[in-house]
Image (cartoon, helix red, strand yellow):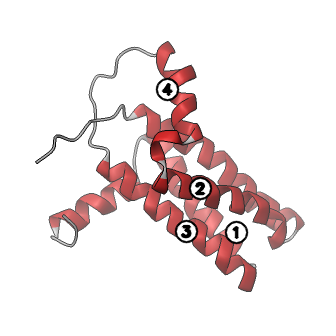
Amino acid sequence: MTEIKRIDPRGPRFGAGITSVLSLASFALSFQFGFIAGYPLMVALFVLFAWSVFLPKNHPYQLIFQKLVRPRLKEPTELEDPRPPQFAQKVGFSFAILGTLGGLVVSALIPIAAAFIFIAAFLNAFFGFCLGCQMYLGLRRFGIIR
């Protein structure tokens, strides 16, 4: 069995902060100027989530955190297993798919997806509570995922 390389938990929280801003802007634009006004930011969220799922080591949030933010911080007091945050990114990606592809059919899905993404990202960024991580742990406890 290979050893899992643990991560600094502040990295995913940093990315969640950026995601909260983008998703809130998508939500707000959808209501201020019509559902489709938030669509370009939903597409951006889709691309960013896809990137985090398929190429996480090259993700812009990761690179910004590693190069600009992390050097200015103290060593983390603890490291975490990367699997729960990776699962959380997949959950976010599913909502971005809903908002991007579903939004083409039913435009009301754009602000709905943006709202769900915002809530999860905001809780992670500002309170350190990762909904997707909690889902991962619950699914593992029930033996649904390994």
Which residue does the image show at 52% across and 40% down from the upper left? Answer: 58
Is 105 above or below relative to 32? below
Whole-number angstrom distance, CA of label 1 to CA of label 4 = 31 Å
Q: Amino acid at mark 3?
A: Phe
Whole-number angstrom distance, CA of label 3 to CA of label 1 = 11 Å
Quarter of the image holding residue 74? top left
Whole-number angstrom distance, CA of label 4 to CA of label 2 = 24 Å
Quarter of the image holding residue 59? top right
- Label 4: which secondary element: helix
- The earlier-in-sequence mark between 4 and 2 is 4
User: Which residue lies under the disc numbered 1?
Assistant: 111
- On the picture, is 66 further left or further right than 142? right
Which residue does the image show at 24% across and 58% down from the upper left? Answer: 137
- On the picture, is 139 further left or further right than 53? left
User: Which residue lies under the disc numbered 4?
Assistant: 66
The front one of 114 and 50 is 50
The front one of 27 and 140 is 140
